Image (cartoon, rainbow, N blue to C red):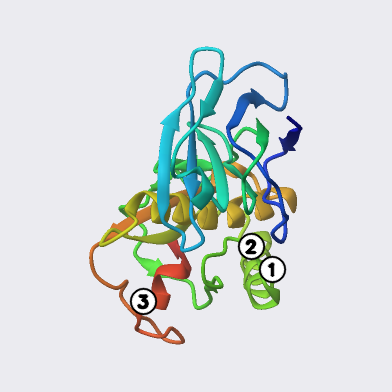
C-alpha cells in the first residue's frame, strides 16, 4: 500500500490536490527546535467547513485515525496552545496519508494588557473604546489578505509608525450560533494575521493586543461595514 507524506510548515496549501488514503496519521513538532508538541489538537473538516472528527495527540505528539467519516475529510487543521495553526487541504482520501505539522510560535499577546512605553498608561481589550477609521473585511472562509486587506493593514502600519508609543487592539469576531470551534479558530487566525504582518514590518509585539470576541448575534455594524453576518469576517483596530 502506498504511503503519502506531508510536511506542513505553518501555512495552508493553496488549492485542492487529489490524494487517496485509508488512514491518516502524523506528528506535531515545534518548527524552531524540532521538539515534539505533546498538547496538539487535530481537526478534520468536510467541504462545507463542518468539523467531522476532532482529536488530541498523544504524549509523543502523534495522532492516527481510521474512521467511517474519513472519506468526508477535505481539510486537516493542526493547532496547539501558543502556536500558529496550520492546515492542509485534501480530497478523495482512499490510501494511507501522513501529515506532520511543524508549528511556529505565535507572535503577539492575546487578551493581555500591555504597558505603553513612555506614557505610564495601560491599554487592554477592555479599555480600548475608540475604533480607528479603517478595518479589514476578510473573504468568506479565509484568513488571508486580499488587496484591500493589505491596504488596510498598511494604513494601520503607517498609523503605528507615526504614533510610536500607541498600542492597538486587534479585534476579530466569532459567531457562536453554529460551528463555534471552527469559527473560533478562524477568528484567531484573522487577528493573528494582522499581528504577524505588523511584526514583520518592525512593529513591536508589545504594542499589539489580540482580542477575539465571541457573539451569538451579528457584530455591531460601523461605517463602511455591511450590517450582516459578513461582519464576523471583520477585524477592527481600537485604541484607548
**First in sequence: mark 1 or mark 3?**
1
Q: Relative to residue 226, is residue 75 drawn left or right?
A: right
Q: Quadrant of residue 7?
A: top right
Q: Which residue is mark 1?
A: 154
Q: Secondary structure at mark 1?
A: helix
What is the distance, in whole Å, between disc 1 and disc 2 at their CAs?
14 Å
**Which residue is more in the foreground, 182 or 4?**
4
**First in sequence: mark 3 or mark 2?**
2
Q: Is residue 240 visible?
A: no
| Image x and y of residue 148, in percent | 65, 78
**First in sequence: mark 1 or mark 2?**
2
Q: Quadrant of the N terminus?
A: top right
Residue at left 68%, top 55%?
Answer: 197
Which residue is at the far top? Answer: 59
| Image x and y of residue 66, in percent | 50, 32
Q: Relative to residue 76, is residue 16 drawn left or right?
A: right
Q: Residues within 10 Å of mark 3 (few under 14, many from 20)?
A: some
Q: Which residue is mark 2?
A: 144
Residue at left 46%, top 63%?
Answer: 48
Q: Which residue is mark 3?
A: 229
Residue 53 vertical placement versus 211 (above, below): above
Q: Relative to residue 69, is residue 103 drawn left or right?
A: right
Amino acid at each position: 500500500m502506498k504511503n503519502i507524506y506531508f510536511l506542513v510548515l505553518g501555512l495552508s496549501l493553496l488549492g485542492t490536490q487529489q490524494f487517496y488514503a485509508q488512514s491518516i496519521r502524523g506528528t506535531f513538532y515545534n518548527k524552531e527546535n524540532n521538539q515534539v508538541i505533546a498538547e496538539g489538537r487535530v481537526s478534520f473538516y468536510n467541504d462545507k467547513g463542518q468539523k467531522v472528527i476532532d482529536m488530541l495527540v498523544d504524549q509523543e505528539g502523534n495522532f492516527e485515525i481510521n474512521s467511517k467519516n474519513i472519506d468526508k475529510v477535505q481539510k486537516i487543521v493542526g493547532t496547539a496552545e501558543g502556536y500558529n495553526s496550520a492546515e492542509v487541504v485534501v480530497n478523495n482520501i482512499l490510501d494511507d496519508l501522513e501529515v506532520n505539522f511543524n508549528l511556529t510560535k505565535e507572535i503577539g499577546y492575546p487578551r493581555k494588557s500591555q504597558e505603553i512605553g513612555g506614557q505610564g498608561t495601560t491599554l487592554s481589550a477592555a479599555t480600548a473604546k475608540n475604533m480607528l477609521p479603517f478595518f479589514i473585511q476578510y473573504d468568506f472562509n479565509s484568513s488571508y489578505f486580499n488587496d484591500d486587506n493589505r491596504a488596510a493593514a498598511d494604513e494601520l502600519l503607517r498609523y503605528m509608525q507615526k504614533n510610536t508609543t500607541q498600542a492597538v487592539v486587534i479585534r476579530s469576531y466569532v459567531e457562536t450560533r453554529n460551528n463555534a470551534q471552527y469559527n473560533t479558530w478562524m477568528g484567531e487566525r484573522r487577528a493573528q494575521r494582522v499581528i504577524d504582518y505588523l511584526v514583520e514590518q518592525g512593529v513591536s509585539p508589545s504594542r499589539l493586543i489580540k482580542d477575539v470576541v465571541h457573539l451569538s448575534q451579528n457584530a455591531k455594524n460601523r461605517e463602511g461595514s455591511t450590517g450582516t453576518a459578513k461582519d464576523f469576517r471583520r477585524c477592527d483596530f481600537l485604541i484607548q
